[in-house]
Amino acid sequence: MEIEEIVDKVIRGEIEFHRLEQLVEPNLAVVIRRLVVEKRNGIQIPSIGSTIIDFKQVYGRNIENPIGAVQLPLGVAGPIAVRGHFANGDFLIPLATTEGALVASVNRGAKAVTKAGGAKVLILRDAMSRAPLFKLKSVEEVGEFLRWIQANLEGIRAAAESTTKHGKLVDVQPFVVGDNVWLRLSFETGDAMGMNMVTIASEEVCNYVERNFSKAECIAVSGNMCSDKKQSYVNNVLGRGKTVVAEALIPSSVLKEVLHTEAEAVNEVNLRKNLLGSARAGSAQYNAHFANVIAAMFIATGQDVAQVVESSSGITWTEVRGEDLYISVTLPSLEVGTVGGGTSLPTQREALSIMGVFGPGNPPGSNAKKFAEIVAAAVLAGELNLLAALANEELGRAHKRLGRNVKA
C-alpha cells in the first residue's frame, strides 16, 4: 500500500495506530502516524518530526504509538567539585529545563561550593524496592504466613534472583493491616535504576509464594508500600533507590563574595522556610527546590521523570559555625541509573557522558553511584543559592531578568 492509502485506512479505523509497525518498519510508522495526526486535526507539526532518534531502537523499549519527539533547552552548570567515594573531581551538570534562572541558580551555587572546597557526598543505602500485596483469610493465617516467610527466605531469594543477572535480593520486610500482608522486597540493581528488574523478580516471588503457601493470594505485584512515583513516609524513613547525603562548609568570605550574604541570614531562611514552613503546611519535603534540579537532570539524562516525586523528597539542614555556614542535603529516595530506560537515547546518552557516567560501571553499580553523588552535589548547590537569593530578596529580580528577558 502507498503511504496515503495507509493514512486514510488509519483515519477510517481500518488500521489501528498500534498495528502500524506490523505493516511497515518503525521509522516509517512514525511518519504515517504523524501524517494521520496532521490530517485529522488540520494542523502541521514538522518540529515534532525533526528528531535524530532511530525508532527501530526505541520502539518496544521506550515508547508506543510514536509520532516524533519533543525538544527542551539543555544547559550546563558548574563545574562543581564533588568529593564522594565514586565521584571525585570537577563535574559539569547538564540541566534540561524551560525555567529561566534555574541553570544560573545551580551555577552560582556550584561556584560557591567549589570555592569552599567542594561537596562531600556519602551514599548511605542502595536498594530498589517493590512490595507485593497478599490477601489471607484471618490473622491466624497472617501469623502462619509471616513464620513461613521467615523460614523460606532462601527460597524467596532464589526465585527472585532467577529472573536477573544483576539483581540481588537484600531485604524482605513484611507489613500487616488486618488480613493483608505486604512484602517490601529490596534489591541491589547494579547500574540500572532497576524498576523493571525488581518488578519481574517480584512477580516470580509471588508465583513462588502461591505455589508453596496456597493460603496467600497475591492481589498486586505493587501494593503501594514500595512506594513508586508517590510521596510516602516509608521511602523517607527506609529509603528507596539511593539514600544520599551531600554537605559543604561555606566560609564567610565565599558567602560574601559569591552569594552576597551571611551565614545567619541563610540559616534563618532555612529554619523558618524549609523546616517550619514545611511543617506548618503538612509537607514531607523539608527543602526549597530539590525537584527543580532533579527534574532537570532526570530529563537531560533519560531517567524516569515521574520518579521525581519521591526522588525530590528530602531535608536541607544548615548550621552557623562562627561566621561560616554548614549546609547539607539528605535525599532518602534518589532513583537513578546509567543503563536501561531512556539512558540509551542519543542526547540522554551524551548528557550522561558529560559527567562520565554513561553505561555500566566497573565494578558493576559504580557508575550509578557516581551519578547519584553528582546529583546530590547539584541539589546542594541549588539549595544553597536559592536560600541565599531569598535572604537577599533576589529571587524576583533574577526571574524578571532571566525568566522574562527583562532587565531588573
Image (tube, rainbow, N blue to C red):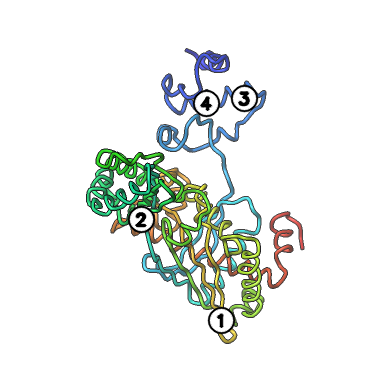
In this rendered view, identify the residue nearer to me: 268 or 6: 268
Residue, disc 3:
38
Q: Circle 1 sits in a helix, a strand or a loop, which is it?
A: loop
Q: CA distance from mark 2 to mark 4?
A: 48 Å
Instruction: Indicate the quadrant containing the C terminus: top left, top right, bottom left or bottom right.
Output: bottom right
Three-letter amino acid code at the position of disc 4: Val
Residue, disc 4:
31
Figure check: 39 above or below 137: above
Residue 348 seen in render: yes
- Residue 387 placement, left or right of 331: right
Residue, disc 1:
251
Three-letter amino acid code at the position of disc 3: Glu
Q: CA distance from mark 2 to mark 1?
A: 43 Å
The crowding category of the residue bearing disc 4, from other C-alpha atoms within 10 Å (few below 14, some 14 to 19, many at least 20), is: some
Which of marks 2 and 3 precedes in the sequence?
3
The numbered disc on residue 173 is 2
The part of the image, by quadrant, that contains residue 135 is top left
Q: CA distance from mark 4 to mark 3?
A: 11 Å
Which of marks 1 and 2 precedes in the sequence?
2
